[in-house]
Image: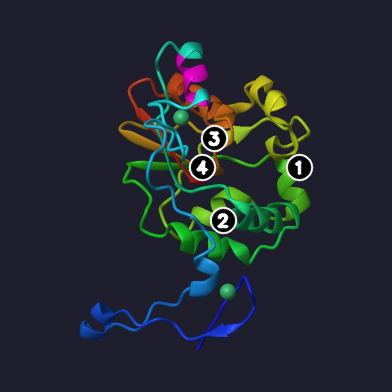
């Protein structure tokens, strides 16, 4: 029996016959098939650049704004899930109420779906928010999946992006800086939990691109 961290019940793990054939033990999953079915993968029509679901045109309205602002230099983003009710509830419990154990559920949802890169750079949480929640919400999700490079720092300016509305988010000033004298060359993948307007990720890219002009920077988020 396995235990589901979302609905808190025991469930029988589904047997993958491929694993059985290879004499592998069934993989422990943090959530049951019923809870898993509530998360909606981004399939079908979506923005060619940021993965926003349900787009009939090539680029979504957010990307069109960034296209103008950055003279066509868009940040290519991959997201796995739609930000639906199940994802919203999970994020609220994890981030707002600080339910640390849920990082396992979030990691499970994206396991083996992160694009390959030379460096994986998590979006940092400000010190005041780490103090409030006792953990760094983004890096905890990714830490067991890929090797992380902690090169971005965040200036503490009070409120979190999650507590702002869309307009306030778009107006946020740059608050990231490169905090180590490493020399990153190659493919850098920025990692975050949710892509809302893209403001955070574009600022992170700006800071990295200024420090490492020869790198290629893309981003990955759980939800869009
Ligand atoms: Zn469940
Ligand atoms: Zn887009």
Question: Is 34 situated above or below 87?
Answer: below
How many angstroms separate mark 1 from mark 4 (CA)? 18 Å
Question: Which label sits on residue 152?
Answer: 3
How many angstroms separate mark 2 from mark 4 (CA)? 12 Å
Instruction: Mark 1 and ligand 2: say if the CB distance to the nearest ligand atom is below 8 Å.
Output: no
Question: Label 3 crowding class (10 Å Cα cut-off): few <14, some 14-19, many 20+?
Answer: many
User: Which residue is at the front of the view, 218 or 3?
Assistant: 3
Label 1 belongs to which residue? 128
**SS state under label 4:** loop
Label 4 belongs to which residue? 150
Q: Which numbered mark, 2 or 4, is in the foreground of this view?
A: 2
Q: Contact, CB < 8 Å: mark 3 with mark 4?
A: yes
Question: Is 162 situated above or below 38?
Answer: above
User: Which residue is at the front of the view, 123 or 196?
Assistant: 196
**SS state under label 1:** helix
Q: Position of residue 49 (x, y in %)?
A: 39, 30
Label 2 belongs to which residue? 140
- The span picked out in magenta is 62-67
């Amino acid at each position: 029996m396995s235990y589901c961290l979302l609905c808190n019940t025991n469930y029988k793990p589904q047997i993958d016959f491929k694993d059985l054939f290879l004499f592998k033990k069934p993989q422990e999953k943090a959530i049951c098939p019923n809870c898993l079915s509530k998360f909606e993968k981004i399939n079908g029509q979506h923005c060619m650049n940021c993965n926003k679901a349900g787009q009939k045109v090539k680029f979504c309205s957010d990307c069109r704004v960034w296209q103008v602002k950055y003279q066509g230099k868009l940040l290519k983003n991959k997201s796995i899930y739609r930000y639906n009710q199940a994802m919203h509830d999970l994020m609220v419990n994890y981030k707002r109420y600080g339910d640390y154990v849920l990082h396992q559920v979030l990691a499970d949802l994206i396991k083996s779906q992160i694009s390959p890169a030379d460096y994986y750079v998590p979006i940092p949480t400000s010190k005041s928010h780490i103090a409030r929640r006792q953990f760094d919400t983004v890096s905890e999700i990714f830490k067991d999946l890929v090797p992380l490079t902690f090169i971005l720092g965040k200036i503490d300016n009070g409120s979190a992006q999650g507590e702002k509305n869309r307009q306030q988010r778009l107006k946020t000033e740059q608050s990231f800086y490169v905090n180590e004298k490493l020399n990153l060359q190659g493919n850098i993948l920025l990692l975050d939990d949710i892509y809302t307007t893209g403001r955070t990720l574009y600022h992170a890219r700006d800071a990295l691109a200024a420090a490492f002009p020869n790198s290629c920077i893309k981003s990955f988020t759980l939800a869009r």
